[in-house]
Amino acid sequence: MTRETSCQKCVALWREYQSATREHVALLKEQEHVAGVETLRFVELEPLIELAAAKRDAARFGIRVHLAAEHYDAPHVMTA
Ligand SMILES: [Zn+2]
């Protein structure tokens, strides 16, 4: 029914989501690493993490919109 694996747009969107997730996780790990040790770096990381989280959300939203538009007949089910 769905054609995710053969859809180039899906492949690109998932790749984007994966890279955004990796970036977000890497920043979170770094922040955890410097917590209680390098306060300045910890604070510096805050906006970067927020930005990475927003990028990840945007990528996820892009996938949802694409799936609703291209792969499902009933877009009204994709409201979340
Ligand atoms: Zn697709």
Image (cartoon, rainbow, N blue to C red):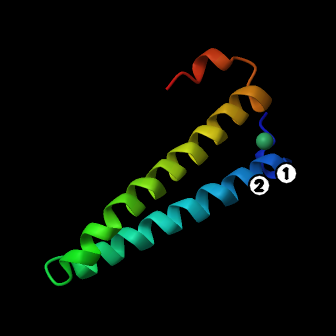
**Residue 3 locus on image (x, y percent):** 81, 42
Quarter in which the N terminus is drawn: top right
Question: What element does badge 1 sit on?
Answer: helix
Q: Residue furthest left?
A: 36
Q: Is residue 20 left or right of residue 74?
A: left
Q: Is residue 29 above or below residue 14?
A: below
Question: What element does badge 2 sit on?
Answer: helix
Which residue is labeled 2 in the image?
A: 11
The answer to which quarter of the image holds residue 40 is bottom left
**Residue 31 locus on image (x, y percent):** 29, 73
Residue 32 visible in the picture: no
Q: Residues within 10 Å of mark 1 (few under 14, many from 20)?
A: few
| Number of numbered discs on residues | 2
Q: Amino acid at mark 1?
A: Gln
Q: Is residue 42 left or right of residue 23?
A: left
The response on whether ligand 1 sits within 8 Å of label 1 is yes
Quadrant field for ligand 1: top right
Q: Identify the residue at image location x=45%, y=55%.
A: 51
The response on whether ligand 1 sits within 8 Å of label 2 is yes
Which residue is labeled 1 in the image?
A: 8
Q: Is residue 33 left or right of residue 68?
A: left
The label number, if any, that marks residue 42 in the structure image: none
**Residue 12 locus on image (x, y percent):** 76, 55
In this view, the residue in front, 73 or 37, is 37
Q: Identify the residue at image location x=51%, y=61%.
A: 21
Q: Amino acid at mark 2?
A: Val
Q: Are marks 1 and 2 in contact (CB under 8 Å)?
A: yes
